[in-house]
Image: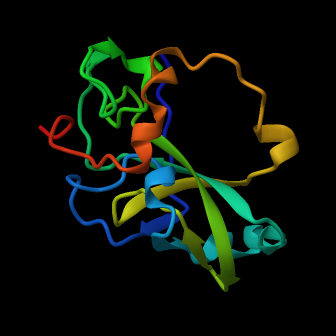
């Protein structure tokens, strides 16, 4: 098996310093402000980003360790297959959020709707484009009955070891 190495391109700054009692999805952090601090050597890559209203953030769950292939997700009480959830303890511990881009000032991006732990290493940024990213999905698995919980549900200790 090949080993991959990622080098963070920056750091995500948010008001969330504890893995407990924070939003579990961006929909539950609709008005939460944060900043993306991109390392200086990537500044040129931010050109034209300010033309987009929303961006994808790919990041490393830096405070997670290990994983289980069956988990009880935040929005359920039934054990589920890990890959049918967005649980933070994963084989590669990569997270993804779509946030509103409020502004770009040098190498600092101001964002809204951030559900990420403070000082999270940023792996990549991609523009969100409705014509590419929004699909007419018609099945949501076990989340059919649970997805609305993400608006109000907060994290707990279940993925902290």
Q: Residue 141: x percent and y percent?
A: 52, 15
Q: Residue 119: x percent and y percent?
A: 35, 66
Q: Residue 47: x percent and y percent?
A: 81, 73
Residue at (32%, 49%) from the top-left corner?
A: 62
Q: Residue 148: x percent and y percent?
A: 47, 38
Look at the image and name its color scheme: rainbow
Q: Nearer the viewer, residue 112 or 94?
A: 112
Q: Nearer the viewer, residue 9 or 55?
A: 55
**Quadrant in which the C terminus appears:** top left
Give the farthest residue toward the right. 131
57 sits left or right of 83 in the view: right
Residue at (34%, 32%) from the top-left corner?
A: 75
The number of numbered badges drawn on the structure is 0
Residue at (26%, 15%) from the top-left corner?
A: 78
Residue 160 visible: yes
Q: Is residue 21 above or below residue 106?
A: above
Residue at (45%, 16%) from the top-left corner?
A: 142
Q: Nearer the viewer, residue 11 or 14?
A: 14
Q: Nearer the viewer, residue 151 or 56?
A: 151
Residue 7 visible: no
Q: Is residue 77 above or below residue 10?
A: above
138 sits left or right of 149 in the view: right
Q: Is residue 38 above or below residue 116?
A: below
């Amino acid at each position: 098996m090949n080993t991959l190495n990622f080098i963070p391109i920056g750091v995500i700054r948010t008001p969330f310093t504890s893995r407990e009692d924070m939003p579990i999805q961006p929909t539950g952090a609709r008005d939460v402000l944060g900043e993306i601090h991109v390392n200086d050597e990537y500044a040129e890559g931010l050109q034209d980003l300010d033309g987009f209203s929303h961006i994808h953030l790919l990041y490393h769950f830096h405070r997670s360790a290990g994983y289980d292939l069956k988990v009880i997700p935040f929005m359920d009480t039934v054990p589920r297959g890990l890959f049918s959830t967005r649980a933070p303890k994963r084989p590669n511990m990569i997270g993804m959020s779509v946030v509103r881009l409020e502004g770009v000032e040098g190498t600092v991006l101001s964002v809204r709707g951030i559900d990420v732990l403070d000082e999270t290493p940023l792996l990549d940024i991609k523009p969100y484009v409705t014509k590419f990213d929004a699909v007419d999905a018609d099945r949501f698995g076990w989340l059919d009955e649970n997805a609305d919980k993400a608006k109000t549900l907060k994290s707990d200790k279940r993925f902290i070891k």
